[in-house]
Image (tube, rainbow, N blue to C red):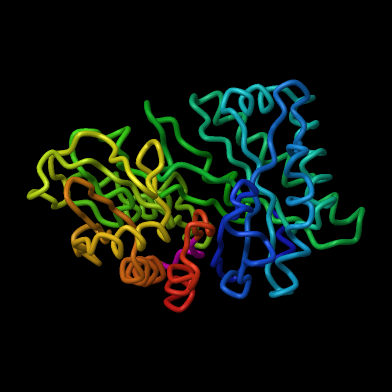
């Protein structure tokens, strides 16, 4: 039987990225809104397969945990490890490389005072890679059990960020049994189903909870598919994602502004990033500046959208967040994570809506 020293009752989590420190310094995070906070990113080195942090972000990452615990001593912090999928694959296939990753990840977590680690291998792309993913998390789990004993500290939490569905193309499946036995939970990337880059010719419900047009492109389908995968992965291992960013399309016709209206790729303009991404806080500025039309909650897809002239933006509102939390909670999932918390407004509207409805 797997050993889990820390029983997690529920997860109300958020991701903070060191790259957003200019927008939201760690000292300004209201950690009382969260049970868990992820700090990103440490990187997987392509030569040594060790976990490292960019020197320019090292102080921010190393001070993150102690900083957020000033406002909420009970918050659990996790170091999120990103990297190229091919580098993760090369690490996981070789026992020496796996050992380098595992030892250095634990050292990085302990060195920064973190309570856990988050593996962002996006994504294993073959059955062999999934087998290596399984071996990796088994070895990683045993290592954190041994580490907790040797340093007489609580066992580190282990999380993997995974695709919205428990299988990828060609029926490549995640190892649900190994996940149940070795990870505290998985974070489902249940958003960015439609973006102006991937779905250029029409607007789309980027973070649909339900999707009458394409069931697989929805958070609800992801949650239920993971729960049913292989040997019925426990709902209490599932944490689903809520984006605090939206996406902006350029409408083909300003008078046709419903979901799936004809479009021509990403919109441009103030507040909007190069691929059409826009923070929730900036969506609110866009609406206010332009007295834009707003649909606070489309009931079929559970997304919000705003439009002005030929700019159309889909996003999460406090109303869509509330409904998604209620539905997911009824499905008995372990919780949710927000990505990323710097995109919220100054009043933490979305984080408050999530926490108050959990």
Q: Which residue occupies 35% across, 63% down?
A: 284
**x then y, percent, for residue 92:** 67, 28
Residue 106 in sight in this render: yes
Q: Is residue 321 above or below residue 270?
A: below
The magenta-colored residue range is 332-336
Q: Would you place residue 71 above or below residue 300 in this image?
A: below
In terms of secondary structure, what is the magenta stretch mainly? loop
Residue at image x 42%, y 77%? 357
Position of residue 241 in the picture relative to residue 181 (left or right): left
Please tell me how many numbered marks the rendered image carries: 0
Judge whether 295 appears above or below 165 on screen. Answer: below
- Tell me, yes or no, whether the highlighted magenta stretch contains residue 334: yes
From the viewer's perspective, tell me whether residue 318 is left or right of residue 139: left
Query: Where is residue 156 shown, x and y percent of the image?
Result: 75, 55
Identity of the residue drawn at 71% across and 65% down? 6
Quadrant of the image occupied by residue 349: bottom left
């Amino acid at each position: 039987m797997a050993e889990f020293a820390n029983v997690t009752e529920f997860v109300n989590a958020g991701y903070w990225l060191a790259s957003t420190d200019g927008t939201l310094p760690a000292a300004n995070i209201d950690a009382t809104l969260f049970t868990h906070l992820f700090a990103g990113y440490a990187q997987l080195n392509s030569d040594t397969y060790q976990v490292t942090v960019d020197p320019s972000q090292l102080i921010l990452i190393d001070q993150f945990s102690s900083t957020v615990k000033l406002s909420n001593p009970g918050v659990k912090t996790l170091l999120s490890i990103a990297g190229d999928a091919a580098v993760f694959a090369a690490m996981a296939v070789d026992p020496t490389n796996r050992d380098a990753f595992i030892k250095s990840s634990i050292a990085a977590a302990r060195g920064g005072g973190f309570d856990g680690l988050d593996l962002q291998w996006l994504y294993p792309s073959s059955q062999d890679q999934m087998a290596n993913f399984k071996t990796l998390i088994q070895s990683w789990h045993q290592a954190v059990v041994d580490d907790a004993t040797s340093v007489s500290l609580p066992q580190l939490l282990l999380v993997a960020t995974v695709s919205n569905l428990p299988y990828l193309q060609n029926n490549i499946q995640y190892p649900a049994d190994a996940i149940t036995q070795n990870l505290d939970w998985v974070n489902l990337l249940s958003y960015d189903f439609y973006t102006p880059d991937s779905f250029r010719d029409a607007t789309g419900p980027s973070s649909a909870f339900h999707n009458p047009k394409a069931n697989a492109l929805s958070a609800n389908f992801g949650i239920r598919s993971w729960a049913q995968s292989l040997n019925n992965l426990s709902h209490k291992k599932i944490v689903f994602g809520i984006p605090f960013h939206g996406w902006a399309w350029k409408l083909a016709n300003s008078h046709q502004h419903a979901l799936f209206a004809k479009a021509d790729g990403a919109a441009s303009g103030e507040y909007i990033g190069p691929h059409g991404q826009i923070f929730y806080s900036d969506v609110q500025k866009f609406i206010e500046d332009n007295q834009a039309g707003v649909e606070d909650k489309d009931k079929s897809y559970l997304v919000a959208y705003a439009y002005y002239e030929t700019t159309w933006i889909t996003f999460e509102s406090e109303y869509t967040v509330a409904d998604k939390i209620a539905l997911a909670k009824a499905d008995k999932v372990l919780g949710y994570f927000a990505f990323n918390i710097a995109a919220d407004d100054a009043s933490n509207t979305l984080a408050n809506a999530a926490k108050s409805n959990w």
